[in-house]
Amino acid sequence: MTFEPFYYAVQDALKVFICFPILCAIFRAIFIAVYNPYPTLKDKWGIIGGCFRYGFWWGMDYNAYLFLIPMLVVGLPAVFWPQIETVYGTSIRLVIGCAYALVLYAFFMAKMMFYKHFHDIFNSQIHMAGHAEKNNLRDVFFNEDHGLLWIVGVLPYIVAVGFGLYGMLQIPLIPYYHVDINWLQYIANFILVLTAVAFFYWIRYGGTFMHDDKPEWDTIPTKVKEDIFFARATVDDLVAYKWAKRKQLSSYLTKSDEEMNQAITRLVPEKYKASWQSLKNPLYAFKRKTNGFKIGKPSQIFLIVGESVPQWAFDDIFKDLHIVDATKAFMDDLHTARVTTALPAGNMSRPSIVSLMSGVYDAQLELNEREEMWTHTLPTAMAAQLKGLGYQTIYWYGGNASYGNFNKYGKANGFDRVESATHFCSADAPKTWVGVYDDVFLKTVAQKTEELEKPTFHFVYTTSNHSPYKIPDEILGYDADKALVNVGEDIRRDKRKVKELATAYYSDQATQDFIKSILAAHPDALVVYTGDHSNLYAHLNNTSMLPRDWTIRELFCTPILIHHKDITQDTFGQVPIGSHMNIMPTILDLIAPKGMTYYSLVPPLTEAQPDILATPMQWISQKEIGTVETKLVEELILPARKESVLKRTPEDKRGLELAEDYATLSAWLVKHERTKLDIL
């Protein structure tokens, strides 16, 4: 047994590996040259540089294995059988390299064709290929996409790659190191193995050892991502395919036109059931009229959406945690009306924000990622409708709004400005991977709103109450020993639970300090506060505080608080339930003159609510709450109690049907996005 062949195998593996980022860069350059939409690239070189740099590291997701595999296949066996390296090593590496090069060629060819037809790199539509008519695909491939040329091109391509790999492998190797002392030789060999393994992981994760810091779509450099063509060009073909395969095609998009039409007919108001198909799109069937001023017209409107603000935290059984005391005081204000149990528009942050902005449910369709949705607006869009009342509109995000393309999606939904805290806060502002610390972000927003002279609608979205909960304890300011004095030791002594509770406390304090400051600066402001979704931080189920599992209400619901000097706690009557979709029509009905036309899927809280409210994920009535995923319901018990709540199969299926119909409506909009939506 000798280690010398492994040493040389590592060097040759490195030479093979180097070829493939270069090959991917060549493919990227060809893609840009063929599909570049600009008459000149004169002002694009900075973006192009970022595109190639970031694409190089992101491509390591696969290219890194061209270092690992030859090293393992040749190097390790060669320790025991040196002839594998000396006699067969070059041939094996050429076979491995050429096989991978063929894979890259096939996916590059497929992407070029896909982009030609769909003006996009691989996306969720690849899932539909299995249902496509095969003869038609074959005809398109050979007659429209010049498939024969692509096939014939394989031969010169693989010859060129083979010669390139062979030439690379002829580069002289660094001679093996020999140490006279055996144990030092073993240590040196061991260090080489560790270095080789570490190098693989480092390149595999894109130049970092931290999995969370791996390159991904959201972290494409902002200047690159804001140019959608070069953002797409950044993504290597195998990475794009993996990314698209992970995004399963929504079952709602596979429904027939007849099924979609039946669902929409069930949804639209009675007067449009026979005529909605004559409208440009079905959202125009949800036309409503305001009832007239309920409050003095505010100079500023704030919709504050807090990251992970759950309803359960406000229930009495959790009061000893003292994590939302500041918001409880705001909730108890004589001029704050509230909905204590509201369904979120989405169970995760982005679907929730997408739905709030657009007035239709995202329904896991990722509307914000669809290019057509960046150039079209919906009649139900919140900011667009508020502009009709003379408000300028600003989306203030605690992170980088280019993540998720909200810089484009926000503009399409009526926001005059989309502001990222990572840009408008100071360069040294403390931040998590999600965004700038809430207190810094919100204080900066408050300062900037004081400079505004025009009536403004502000959509403010915080980020700090989010995993992995690494804000320093001295920033959080949560005295756990004092706050949790009446809480069981199983919670008090659990550092992870306390950290998560402390983060919720910090975010709650920062938000209410912000609300106090804006009300001091704008006493006539209308303030709406809710959470993007629930969050079960601190994992309190089956603890001394909560000796059961979470209820459906606790799993999903978030409160809605609406404050204005002319509002009282009973402005909306006794309304214990609601949804995010109630927010926009409620704002309009509070501040607009009588008879203003607007579009909303649901009525405002100033009017009677339907028997059942639903989102694509849950539904709720005055008596029960259920989920689409489990198709189970439980009794809606207010206030919450420590005893378990029985889940059962619902007798009334209307909630399930309504949830599915809302999702189908969104799918209809996606399916017809190029022909039926209003161009900005």
Image: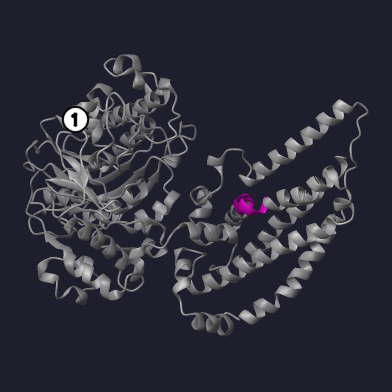
> Would you say residue 60 sits in the magenta stretch?
yes
Q: Disc 1 marks which residue? A: 330
* Helix, strand or loop under label 1: helix
**Residue 588: image location, x then y, percent:** 16, 51
**Residue 445: image location, x then y, percent:** 34, 37
Magenta residues span: 54-64
Please state if 414 lies on the left or on the right of 221 as rendered. left
Please state if 192 lies on the left or on the right of 456 as rendered. right
Q: In this view, does 272 lie above or below 180?
A: below
Q: Nearer the viewer, residue 645 or 378?
A: 645
Q: Which of 309 and 526 is in front in this view?
A: 309
Which corner quadrant holds the C terminus? bottom left
Give the residue at x 76% y 38%. Answer: 193
Q: Which amino acid does label 1 sit on?
A: Phe
Label count reads 1
Give the residue at x 14% y 30%. Answer: 333
Q: Nearer the viewer, residue 569 or 41?
A: 569
Give the residue at x 36% y 25%. Answer: 502
Q: In this view, does 29 lie above or below 69?
A: below
